[in-house]
Image (spheres, helix red, strand yellow):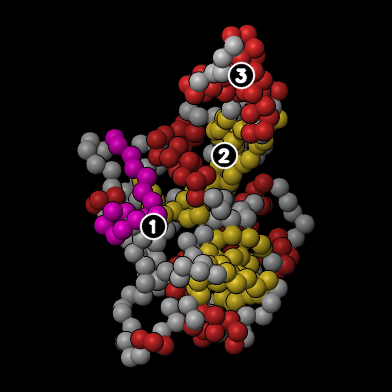
Amino acid sequence: MFKNMIVYRIAAQWQGALEQMEEALQKTPFTPCGATQEKSSGWVPPRGEEHGLLAESVGGQWVMRYMSESKMLPASVLNRKVAEKAEAIEKEFGRKPGKKEKQELKDEAKLDLLPMAFTKQGAMWVWLDPQAKLLVLDTGAQGRADEVVTLLVESLQGFGVALLDTQTSPQAAMAHWLISQEPPVGFSVDRECELKAADESKAVVRYARHPLDIDEVKQHVEQGKLPTKLAMTWDDRVSFVLSDTLQVKKIAFLDSVLDEAGDEGGFDTDVAIATGELSRLIPDLIDALGGEGRTELGQDLPAALQPSGSGTETLAVRVAGGRPAGQGGKVTGPAEAPVDTDPQSVPF
């Protein structure tokens, strides 16, 4: 449970109840794809029990499960079917179909093939901490996260979120940790890293199962290659890979955590372990990155990000979307500008 994390801050003014969440999820339950349906998505009971609740609470932590299903239709198969239909028209009428007609043939071919196509399913854990006002999605794909967030925002009245943002960008912080060999308190740097050049060369250097406290790594950073991924361990309990977009990937709970859990298993135990550890890791990681930026804990979102009008509108905001500041863009960097003593020696 929870191999990845994309973290959102929930607007402090939202005070939803579990019953409200259940009612909202019931609007879009998952149903498998129909014969000619290309994709289907929705909510399934997180315990895996048929007709069970769609929103479960374990120790005050809300857990949901989002399921998606899509038909696998290879392009080569579809193109071959279209070619067959076009050839049949040419033989019957002595002419080749035009561009518009070919698109219609493609749509027809897809409808013919979809009932025979294999289906692919994927599920995502969704965790909401109502006290800390955090929404955590178990995915490393921002597109999939946007899909879930949009569905929640449209279903829950007054629900507004923003991607977690920090005072110091993860990339700047990771570069500092690699050069100084001084990770933040409670964390250690592991043996995996990816560095990418910021110039037009886009050169990439990757280290896997390799010590990073070597001069070679420092030199790469000093020469302009910035870290995009860095493996770390928190409190000797959870290992993960931090990305330059503040995504947390490859989460693994270490033996110290599993030993404390003992031989007990099941849904409630898994949820308690995952949410218990990650709910302590997240604030420590935020502190390591200089604290929150636009959406500090316990404060309302900026007025520009809040629902407007009669209060019935909802809003999903991507703070870390790479857009300019003032337009929902990401504002990163240290809280105070460093003293510029020797610009040529600055590594990042």
| Sequence-earlier tag: 3 or 2 | 2
Determine the residue positioned at 71% across, 47% down: 266
In the image, residue 215 sits, relative to residue 81, either above or below, namely: below
CA gap between label 1 and label 3 equals: 44 Å
Amino acid at pointer 1: Gly
Prevailing SS of the magenta stretch: loop
The residue that label 3 is drawn on is: 86
What's under tag 2, amino acid-wise? Tyr
Mark 2 secondary-structure assignment: strand
Q: Name the spot of residue 46 as percent of width and height, x first.
A: 61, 40
Q: Position of residue 231 (x, y in %)?
A: 61, 70
Amino acid tagged 3 = Ala
Counting the numbered discs, the total is 3
Of all residues, the one furthest to the right in this rendering is: 263
What whole-number distance in Å separates the C-alpha atoms at marks 2 and 1?
A: 26 Å
Of marks 2 and 1, the one in the foreground:
1
Residue furthest to the front: 94
Residue 147 seen in the figure: yes
Residue bearing the label numbered 1: 322
| Chain-order first, disc 1 or disc 3 | 3
Q: Which mark is residue 4?
A: none
Q: Is residue 205 above or below residue 2?
A: below
Q: Which residue in the protein does label 2 denote? A: 66
Residue at position x 29%, y 60% in the image: 325
Do the numbered discs 3 and 2 sit on residues whose CB atoms are within 8 Å? no
Where residue 348 appears, as percent x and y from the top left, is 43, 78
Position of residue 87 in the picture relative to residue 304 (left or right): right
Q: Which residues are magenta?
A: 312-328
Circle 1 crowding by C-alpha within 10 Å: few under 14, some 14–19, many from 20: few
